[in-house]
Amino acid sequence: MKALDGIKILDFTHVQSGPTCTQLLAWFGADVIKVERPGEGDATRKQLVDVPGADSLYFTMLNHNKRSIELNPKTPKGKEILTRLVKSCDVLVENFAPGALDRMGFGWERIQELNPRMIMASVKGFGPGKYEDCKVYENVAQCAGGSASTTGFLDGPPLVTGAQIGDSGTGLHLALGIMTALFQRERTGRGQRVLAPMQDGVLNLCRVKLRDQQRLEKGPLTEYSQHGEGIPFGESVPRAGNDSGGGQPGRILKCKGWETDPNAYTYFITQAAAWPKVCDVIGKPEWKDDPDFATPKARLTRLNFIFETIEQWTMTKTKFEVMEICNPLDIPVGPILSMKEIAEDEGLRATGTIVEVDHPTRGAYLSVGCPIKFSDLEVEVKRSPLLGEHTEEILRDVLGYTENEIHEIAGSGAIGALPKAAE
Ligand code: COA
């Protein structure tokens, strides 16, 4: 028994944002039917290819546990099949460019006519307004949602971050929206539209920076290192380098081996409660009673000097030794882990957050499993579908087409070529 057993998702998503959402729903037990363009499929199948002829990691890592049907809803037969799918599914998820679904003849009005219980969930780049017609990718959303202007160093250009907060972040928002709409449908019996614009999703994740914008209007942001450096603030929240975003100052500091290892660093937070222990660990016990260092307020103007001093200590230890020493003392630190280290991390493998998945054409590969853990829901990561792998089975078992009808459909151009055995 899985949480979403019996829920059918008509998955019109592609690239990253939408597939992130539907992959989660599939992990939670929904039957996710991914609709793909005959002969081509999701464009990511052929992007960043590492094993010639096999689906790319970009695709496989975002489409686990789904079924794939090849279908062109722009053909008459394709429209008939899509109509039947809409009638038999609970949720339609899509992240086409604005207007694409309407052009196919399946806008919200039509969907409601066909199935009033259906939830129609969309990712778009922007919400209603002057940019609503724009096509948007990850980095555009990071820029338009406020992340890029607040990421990077004060003296450098805006920076995008490696975390896919625009795509995967919005996919997460949409999944929550869908679950909420399903829950509401339990009470009302009605479906509804759910929209997760990428700009809004990024902004939601940058909430603390809008907090700081309003604080800035009242005075300097004293916890930002530029304040201690005597650099005046401008009109908007500046890039804060590796300053901690909260009230507890923190920095990235070099560790043993930094000269040759680009990731021999630790994040070090001087949480007020742990300050006496920080002083002892770094060999500065006198700072505990020194009025220049004893209080968070006094430290604010000396943060650069303080972190330089702490770094003299962290540079004598590996990032893992820093963790081993500081953790028992409740000093919050974290090693900068490389992707190689994460791929090999035994703990993440033990919890299923890093999983090895087998695939018929590409062989075994690593993926990120479900990052949410349940006490009463087991998530099993199954390989992504081959293009059109389930076309026949969905037409037959979900929609009730007979073998003869399926042959007829195959000749109409609405679906891809059927496997030899079925012809
Ligand atoms: N059969 C036939 N046609 C299909 C099809 C299928 N199964 N699936 C898609 N198509 C068509 C669409 O109907 C559309 O045709 P139209 O423009 O003539 O109406 C066409 O394929 C292209 O779709 P589109 O979504 O515009 O793809 P794109 O590659 O041009 O743009 C994005 C990609 C991501 C920029 C765009 O989809 C977008 O802005 N999406 C919303 C925001 C988003 O999710 N961005 C992040 C993606 S990770």
Image (spheres, grey):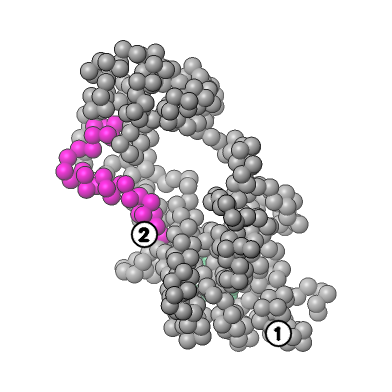
Q: Label 1 is placed on what type of residue?
A: Tyr
Position above or below: 230 against 217: above
Whether residue 217 is in magenta: the answer is: yes
Residue 34 visible in the snapshot: no
Q: How many marks?
A: 2
Q: Secondary structure at mark 2?
A: helix
Name the residue at 61% across, 38% down. Answer: 347
Left or right: 241 in relation to 68: left
- Residue 54: numbered disc: none
Residue 331 visible in the snapshot: yes
Q: Quadrant of residue 72?
A: bottom right
- Can you tell me whether the CB of the residue at mark 2 lies under 8 Å from the nearest atom of ligand 1? no
Q: Secondary structure at mark 1?
A: loop
Write the start and end of the magenta stretch as one range: 198-227
Q: Nearer the viewer, residue 355 or 71?
A: 355
Position above or below: 355 against 312: below
Left or right: 351 in relation to 362: left
Q: Position of residue 276 (x, y in %)?
A: 35, 20
What residue is shown with label 2? 200
What residue is shown with label 1? 401
Whether residue 406 is in magenta: the answer is: no
